[in-house]
Structure formats: C-alpha cells, structure tokens
Image: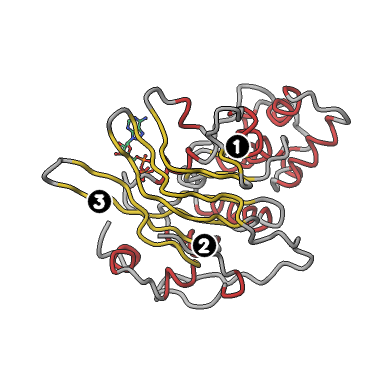
C-alpha cells in the first residue's frame, strides 16, 4: 500500500480511549516540510533465507513523526534498521526493492553506509551511553567527524536541544552512566543530534522508561520535529497517537503450508485516520485490542 502525504488533512479524530493529538502547522515551518525524505518501493528485508518483511511501499514525509505499530515479530525494527543500513551489521541480512533517501538509492554500491548513518541517526530501546563522561558522549561523533569550531558550544547546544542541559550543566565530567534512565536516553538523543543528522530513527525509545521520563521524551520529540524527520517504532498505541503525524500498521502474514511468517504493511495513513477511521479491519482490530 502506498499513499501520498496529505499534510493538509492532519488532525482530529481518535479512537475512543486513544487521544490523537492534532498537529498545528508550525509557524515558520520550512517549505520542504511534508516532502518525502524516504520513498520505499516493494521493500523487503531477509535474514538468510527468511523473509522478515516484504512488499513495503511508502513515503515518509520530511519533518514529521511517523510511527510503526504492529504485533511482535511483524518486522517493525527490521524495517526501521533498513532505513539507515543498520541491518548491514547483521550477518546474512539483505534487502530487496528500493529504499530512496532524498531521491537516492541508499543501497547503491557507491553509497557509504557510514555517511548514511551520520545523516540518519538512531536511538535504541535501551539507553546505551558510551562508558565516557556526559561531555565526551556528546562530543564523540563530532570529534570523529573532525568538527571545527567550539566543541563546548556544540555540546551545550546538543544537550539543550535534548532538554538535558539544565540537569547536567554542572556535571559534564561525570559518567553518562551516573544519569537516570530517562536522562541517559536524552543523552543518547543529544549524542545523535550532535552530528547534525537529518533523520532520527527511534526503536521503542521509551520502553525502558517510567511514565514521567516517557512524557519528557515525547515532549522532546514534538519539539524535535521542527528540525528533524523522526521515525519511531512503538508498542504503545497511546504514544503513537500522542506524538506521530502518520502511522504505519504492520502485521504478520502467516502461510501455514509453507510454514512462513512474513511481516507486511497493512495500512499507512495520517495517525488521526488510522485511529478513527482505519480502512483495513486488521488495523481496527489491532487498535481496539481485539488482536495482537
Ligand atoms: N538478527 C536477526 N536474525 C534473524 N532473524 C531476525 C533477526 N532480527 C529479527 N529477526 C526476525 O525477523 C522478524 C521480525 O523481527 P523484528 O524484531 O523486526 O520485529 P518487531 O515487529 O520489531 O518485533 P517486536 O515488536 O517483538 O520487537 C522476526 O521473525 C524475528 O525473529
């Protein structure tokens, strides 16, 4: 299924019990907001001979938050990792179809996966600061990239953007591990931001956090979408409804005869539509808790 973005339709609706937060157009939002940053056509990912997810065609608009939801094993994380070639690091993983980023095939032989990952950052389920100081966690990527200019300014700016500066400004030399789980996750977001990515992929970034830390990350995401394109995998449908502009629902197609379980994209649309007026019964059943 492939749907063109229609940003003008955003907002409203919501399934009973799930509050969808309508998004107002940002004052001063750049003109390219809503233009696809990713275009997938018949995309698939395999691990060896096992096809984890296939037949995915979708456009991800720029400077929006897109959420992937669906039952366990439907390939959400697999698909997310294929957006910045993180699956390259898994032996036996391979992709099919087309993954375009700003119009360029990111799997073309001449493309450098390290550069892809600089432009498309990632935040994982479990906060994973480096065993270094708070400062050095943020400075690590820029140093590798040969950042010129004031590192202190860049570290401060990145920590401010991650809503963490006020909490750590007096202890920048302390270990990243000395922070709470929620602070560690914001440190990982600051680390991702520090190398000036265009896109940030988030794989269940709040699943290890308490509700207050989760709400802080959600606030942060809403703020970040003025500047970044965010794609998030979440098990939490309230979270998808609260933060995302668009939602993709994936499921597992089971072929009993062949003994295969393959992830597939069922429906992709504005979050308000998915939660109030899904066009596929499987989506509605999942959202209402009848399945999954
Ligand atoms: N490194 C791997 N090697 C082989 N198979 C894998 C690997 N990672 C995931 N898979 C398989 O690919 C399928 C999709 O897994 P994936 O983790 O992407 O699903 P998911 O929807 O993110 O699941 P969950 O919600 O449980 O995290 C599953 O059948 C899983 O077992």
Say which element carries label 1: helix
Label 1 belongs to which residue?
Answer: 184
- Colour mode? secondary structure
Nearer to me, 284 or 236: 284
Q: Tell me the tag on residue 253.
A: 3
Provide residue 242's location: percent of width, then percent of height: 53, 64
Say which element carries label 2: strand
- Residue for point 40% across, 72% down: 17
Of mark 2 and mark 1, the one earlier in the sequence is 1
Q: Seen from this angle, which residue lies furthest right?
A: 149
Residue 139, quarter of picture: top right
Q: Quadrant of ligand 1?
A: top left
Q: Is mark 1 within 8 Å of ligand 1?
A: no
Say which element carries label 3: strand
Residue 123, quarter of picture: top right
Question: Spatial distance from mark 1 to mark 3, Cα to Cα?
Answer: 37 Å
Nearer to me, 180 or 282: 282
Q: Is mark 3 within 8 Å of ligand 1?
A: no
| Residue 177 in sight from this viewpoint | no
Question: Spatial distance from mark 2 to mark 3, Cα to Cα?
Answer: 22 Å
**Mark 1 Cα shell of 10 Å, populated few (<14), some (14-19), many (≥20):** many
| Residue 97 in sight from this viewpoint | yes
- Residue for point 72% across, 36% down: 194
Q: Is residue 48 left or right of residue 225?
A: left
Provide residue 127's location: percent of width, then percent of height: 54, 36
Label 2 belongs to which residue?
Answer: 246
Above or below for 43 versus 30: above
Q: Is mark 2 within 8 Å of ligand 1?
A: no
Mark 2, mark 3: which one is toward the viewer? 3
Nearer to me, 256 or 71: 256
Provide residue 180's location: percent of width, then percent of height: 58, 38
């Amino acid at each position: 299924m492939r749907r063109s973005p229609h940003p003008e339709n955003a907002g409203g609706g919501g399934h009973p019990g799930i509050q969808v937060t309508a998004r107002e157009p940002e004052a001063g939002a750049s003109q390219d907001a809503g233009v696809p940053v990713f275009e997938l056509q018949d995309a698939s990912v395999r691990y060896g001979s096992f096809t984890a997810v296939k037949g995915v065609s979708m456009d991800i608009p720029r400077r929006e938050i897109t959420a992937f939801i669906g039952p366990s094993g439907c390939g959400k994380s697999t698909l997310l990792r294929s957006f910045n070639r993180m699956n390259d690091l898994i032996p036996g993983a391979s992709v099919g179809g087309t993954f375009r980023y700003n119009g360029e095939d990111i799997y073309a032989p001449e493309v450098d996966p390290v550069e892809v990952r600089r432009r498309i950052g990632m935040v994982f389920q479990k906060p994973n600061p480096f065993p270094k100081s708070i400062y050095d966690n943020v400075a690590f990527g820029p140093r590798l990239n040969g950042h010129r200019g004031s590192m202190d300014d860049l570290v401060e700016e990145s920590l401010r953007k991650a809503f963490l500066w006020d909490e750590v400004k007096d202890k920048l030399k302390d270990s990243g591990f000395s922070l709470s789980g929620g602070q560690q996750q914001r440190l990982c977001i600051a680390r991702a931001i520090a190398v000036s990515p265009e896109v940030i992929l988030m794989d269940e970034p709040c699943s290890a956090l308490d509700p207050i830390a989760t709400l802080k990350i959600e606030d942060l995401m809403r703020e970040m979408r003025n500047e970044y394109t965010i794609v998030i995998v979440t098990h939490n449908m309230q979270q998808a409804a609260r933060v995302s502009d668009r939602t993709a629902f994936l499921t597992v197609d089971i072929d009993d005869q062949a003994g295969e379980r393959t992830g597939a994209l069922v429906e992709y649309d504005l979050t308000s539509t998915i939660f109030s007026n899904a066009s596929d019964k499987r989506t509605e059943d999942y959202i209402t808790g009848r399945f999954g």
